[in-house]
Amino acid sequence: MPAERIFCAAIAALSGAGLFLQSGIPEGRPRKTMFVYYTNLSNLVIFVYHVLLLACGFRGGRLYRFLNGAGVRMSMTLCIWVTHLIFHFVLRPYFKNRRGRFDDAGFAVGNALVHYIVPLACVAEWVLCADKNAAFADCLAWLAIPCAYFVFVLIFAAAGGRVGGNGARYPYPFIDRDALGTGRFLRNAAIALLGFFALSLLLYAAAALLR
């Protein structure tokens, strides 16, 4: 329990600090659309989740049992782990090959927190502290995470939202329907869903081994 409390407090502090630094507020340039990005949304979810765990005081009760359930704990880990994997293996190479860097591609402290330190801390927390008896059916239920994000992005774009300084309606190039067309957008969305499902199966298998 002490290790779990330490992890919980540290992750809440790290994700909160990362979001604050990513917000642009320290530079006096608030990013009005920062929560259009999956990175920041996933870190916000992790922040709220760990703050709620701390508020429960690890004393038990209905809310604590729900938050500490194996399925919820694993879904939180998966949600933030995807942030790290997509950024490191897809976005960084993409923008490095095209224009060197973009607003989230440098190794500033905030960027390192939300893309590297918080995700890896959450994986470590899950390995060391979490209940690992999630059901196989949870792997399908977790697909609601990327599906909800894709729906959100489509609604944002349809409402005339803009992200970044180039007037794009979509936050990431691999889901930019304007640039890709509907066919390639749907193809990439399907690939993303399959990748997310594969990661959930990997995490489920890891849980079985760790048990």
Image: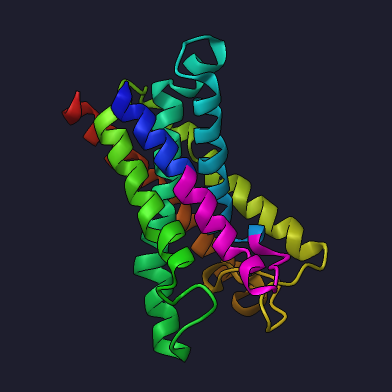
**Secondary structure, magenta segment, majority class:** helix
Residue 184 in the image: x percent, y percent? 55, 70
Residue farthest top in this picture = 61
Residue 149 in the image: x percent, y percent? 61, 51
Question: In the rendered image of this protein, does residue 25 appear above or below residue 130?
Answer: below
Query: What colour scheme has been applied to the protein in the rendered image?
Result: rainbow
Number of marks in the rendered image: 0
Question: In the rendered image of this protein, does residue 88 appear above or below residue 118?
Answer: below
Q: Nearer the viewer, residue 24 or 159?
A: 24
Q: Quadrant of the N terminus?
A: top left
Residue 131 figure quarter? top left
Q: Is residue 73 left or right of residue 155?
A: left
Residue 50 in the image: x percent, y percent? 49, 34
Q: Is residue 202 left or right of residue 176?
A: left
Q: Is residue 33 magenta?
A: yes
Q: Is residue 127 magenta?
A: no
Q: Nearer the viewer, residue 6 or 70?
A: 6
Q: Nearer the viewer, residue 97 or 190?
A: 97
Image point (54%, 77%), residue name? 103
Image point (70%, 68%), residue name? 30
| Magenta stretch in the rendered image | 13-34
Q: Quadrant of the C terminus?
A: top left
Residue farthest right in this picture = 159
Residue 207 figure quarter? top left
Q: Nearer the viewer, residue 117 or 160?
A: 117
